[in-house]
Image (tube, grey):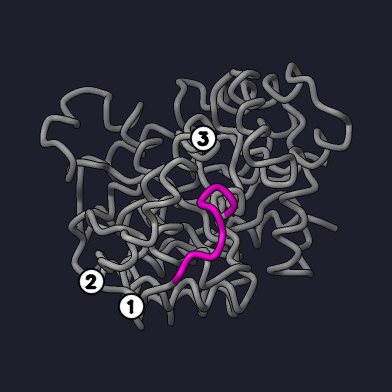
């Protein structure tokens, strides 16, 4: 079995609702991607390339930027109902996830509805929340709930316009800004004590952990400064002493193979994270005109990377199966 653990979706009922209540260029741009909402077309493509199951993760986090809280709650419900409907129609091919653009009591209530009533698994969060880091105090109740219920969290990069006003003038934001912001998010979760406080929290990153695998040695060299960082308590969150090297916490993250075609990059990621923490994930159907390039490139990277049969099976199925079944043992798609 091949499980795509990071494919994108955007139900028509969500884009229709956003068009009525909070129209934006980001949401409107999704109209040209029928594969985001057409289940039958998706399945035809999956059959063509040999993918058995897709995990459906909501697309385009920038469409949530600036959204008023009351609208956000309603749009979360529309997203969850739309994704759940796709899964209900094809339960043997799709596994749906929830989305949490922010965190407060209402968001947690909606996540529980998505998990308990709709059968969705885990939730997508963003690498920053309106410019605030993921170790901000208001996010901790989400981590506590996710760990308690063994629900994985998918981190998707968000726009980084808080860094430089000119970063959106070209493709810098998505091409380099997104993996950079993913890297910052991972480090904030480590430095801020989230990964220490919640040792069983399962977090899946996009793009093979951004820049983390390539700078592991440099990050390790800063270990002596972590105590000073925590003593300043920069985020105002709980002060949590880190009991292990930074790289040990970073290796707890799970990471997808959405790296375009690059066996060398995959090898680097595997060397840092290990075979048990990399999952086949494609960014489908984004990043190409026909929507299929990311999937084909990820499969070729795995095929052309020198892997043992055991590691190859972990990437294509084993790791995703383990995480998903811990969260929801009865998933029909995994039977």
Taking the image as shown, residue 64 lies to the left or right of residue 331, namely: left
Tell me the element at label 2: helix
Q: Position of residue 84 (x, y in %)?
A: 57, 63
Q: Position of residue 109 (x, y in %)?
A: 43, 82
Please give the label number shown on residue 217.
3
- Residues drawn in magenta: 241-248
Residue 120 visible in the current orientation: no
Please give the label number shown on residue 201.
none
Point out the frontmost of discs 3 and 2: 3
Task: Give residue 108's quadrant in the image.
Answer: bottom left
Question: Could you tell me what secondary structure mostly forms the magenta stretch?
Answer: loop
* Circles 2 and 1: CB atoms closer than 8 Å: yes
Q: Quadrant of the C terminus?
A: bottom right
Foreground residue, 259 or 20?
259
Tell me the element at label 3: helix
Taking the image as shown, residue 31 lies to the left or right of residue 299, namely: left
Between the C-alphas of marks 3 and 1, the distance is 36 Å
Task: Give residue 260's quadrant in the image.
Answer: top right
Residue that numbered label 2 is attached to = 69
Between the C-alphas of marks 3 and 2, the distance is 41 Å
Residue that numbered label 1 is attached to = 104
Query: Closer to the N terminus: mark 3 or mark 1?
Result: 1
Asked if residue 244 is among those painted magenta in the image, a careful observer would answer: yes
Query: Which residue appears at 21% of the width and 22% of the height?
Result: 170
């Amino acid at each position: 079995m091949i499980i795509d653990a990071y494919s994108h979706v955007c139900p028509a009922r969500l884009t229709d609702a956003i068009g009525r209540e909070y129209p934006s260029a980001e949401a409107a741009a999704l109209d040209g991607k029928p594969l985001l909402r057409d289940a039958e077309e998706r399945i035809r493509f999956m059959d063509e390339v040999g993918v058995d199951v897709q995990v459906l993760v909501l697309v385009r986090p920038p469409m949530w930027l600036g959204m008023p809280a009351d609208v956000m709650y309603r749009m979360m419900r529309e997203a969850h109902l739309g994704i759940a409907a796709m899964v209900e129609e094809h339960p043997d091919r799709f596994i749906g996830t929830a989305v949490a653009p922010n965190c407060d009591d209402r968001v947690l209530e909606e996540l529980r509805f998505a998990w308990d009533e709709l059968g969705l698994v885990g939730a997508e969060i963003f690498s920053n929340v309106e410019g605030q880091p993921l170790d901000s105090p208001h996010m901790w109740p989400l981590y506590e709930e996710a760990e308690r219920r063994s629900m994985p969290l998918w981190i998707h990069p968000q726009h980084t316009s808080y860094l430089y006003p000119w970063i959106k003038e070209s493709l810098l934001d998505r091409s380099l800004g997104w993996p950079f912001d993913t890297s910052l998010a991972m480090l904030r979760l480590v430095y801020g004590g989230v990964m220490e406080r919640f040792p069983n929290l399962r977090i899946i990153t996009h793009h093979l952990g951004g820049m983390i695998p390539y700078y592991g040695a440099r990050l390790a060299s800063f270990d002596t400064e972590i105590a000073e960082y925590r003593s300043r308590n920069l985020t105002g969150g709980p002060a949590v002493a880190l009991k292990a090297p930074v790289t040990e916490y970073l290796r707890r993250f799970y990471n997808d193979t959405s790296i375009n075609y690059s066996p060398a990059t995959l090898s680097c990621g595997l060397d840092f994270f290990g075979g048990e923490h990399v999952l086949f994930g494609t960014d489908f159907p984004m990043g190409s005109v026909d929507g299929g390039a990311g999937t084909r490139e990820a499969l070729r990277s795995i095929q052309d990377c020198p892997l043992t049969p055991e590691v190859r099976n972990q990437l294509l199925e084993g790791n995703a199966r383990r995480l998903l079944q811990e969260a929801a043992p009865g998933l029909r798609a995994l039977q």
